[in-house]
Amino acid sequence: MNKTLITVREYAQLEVAISVKLESLDKAFITEADFKVLCQLEQDRADESQSFLCINGIKKLKVQNYIGIIETPNAIIEVLPKITEKEELEQSRKILKKMLACYLDLPERVANETDLEQYHYPLHEWLMKLFLEKLTILLKKGIRSDYERVEEEQSFLRGQFNIPARMRQPLGRQHIFPIRHDIYSLNRPENRLLKTAVEEICKLTNNSENWRLSHEYRLLMQDIPRSQNYKDDFKQWRDGRLVSYYQDIKVICEIVLSKLTPITTHGTYRGISFLFPMEKLFEKYVAIQIRKQLEPDAILHEQMNGEYLCHYKEDQNRFGLEPDLLIENNGKKLILDTKWKRLDKGKDSISQADVYQMFAYSHKFACDVVLVYPQCEKFTESLAFQFFDGRKLSAVPFNLADEHTISESVQKLISLFPPF
């Protein structure tokens, strides 16, 4: 059965109806069966603090700030980031793919502006297409074989005579020789995982080109067995010089096999499911863009920890501080904290809790601090504040539109670094 693809964005509402239908990027209708699957999935994740849905009325759900793909019995729901109030589907999808390419450490070409223009597929089809493209390159270079130890019984000697097995043989089998020998085989962990990923794509894709390539490659790899244990095989994935060209495909292979997804489906129904928290995506993307333009002597720390607000009794530290980004250069410091929030009312939208948090960072690390928000229609210019101790707090918009505006946003952030 072909499932309906519905594309919504963060904070969209999902309502129960007779059939699956999309009204806008902010509202869609799902069936009763889909509703139950989503509720079960949300309940399963409640204990892990990864809530991506909330109840918003009788038989109504509201998407939270997780983006990605979730499959239900009758629909494939694609959740995109909410960048602007306008419903710009392709722009949101392109920005998301660019951020994911950085977050997943995909090759630089994948994150290229002109390259992304070619991908007008939903997110899951895009990732499967990336996998098949990398597999095409790998197959042209040649998949690696490895020596595999085989223990068997034959009527002739070959390799090493297995004496312990010979001693356990019954009298009626003395004419058969237990032997050990090595064969040069394609059966190695990397190839098993690639074969399994290809077979998964054969089942999941609805794109004609992805379907054609995946079935073609499944035939080419028919002599390679499936992976029976993803976790163990990924642990055995080698990084040596002879298999260095396998590295580009590893991350995408893990996604296709659902091993890197923060949320996966549970219970009786299992389908495609990969959802990523937008706060983490935004934080990682900003960090990568800043690192590209930093001076050689400057150091960018991510998720700094080890500092606390208070001591309790005998040197027991309490209330840990963990700023997102800390730039250091010749003793000078600047703290940046990314917030995936829309400042629709300018300075009046800044949370008081965020300001308190930044004051704690400023006081503890003795430096100026910066709040980084995504740029939106009503927040296009930086805001400057000053704490009563003289240190500065800035709120800066980060424009995700294209390479030029991203570069300008990074320069704006770096310019806040204290002068020498």
Image (cartoon, rainbow, N blue to C red):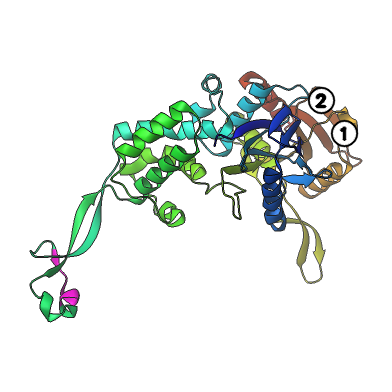
Any part of residue 331 in sight: no
Any part of residue 91 in sight: yes
Question: Which residue is at a point 83% across and 36% down the rendered structure image?
Answer: 393
Q: Position of residue 171 (x, y in %)?
A: 11, 80
Residue 163, quarter of picture: bottom left
Q: Check if mark 1's residue and mark 2's residue have beta carbons within 8 Å.
A: yes
Read off the residue under disc 2: 379
Label 1's element? helix
Q: Nearer the viewer, residue 83 or 88?
A: 88
Between the C-alphas of marks 1 and 2, the distance is 10 Å
Using the image, tell me which numbered label, if any, was put on residue 349.
1
Three-letter amino acid code of the residue under disc 2:
Phe
- For the C terminus, the image quarter is top right
Q: Position of residue 38 (x, y in %)?
A: 69, 47
Count of all numbered marks drawn on residues in the image: 2
Three-letter amino acid code of the residue under disc 1:
Ser
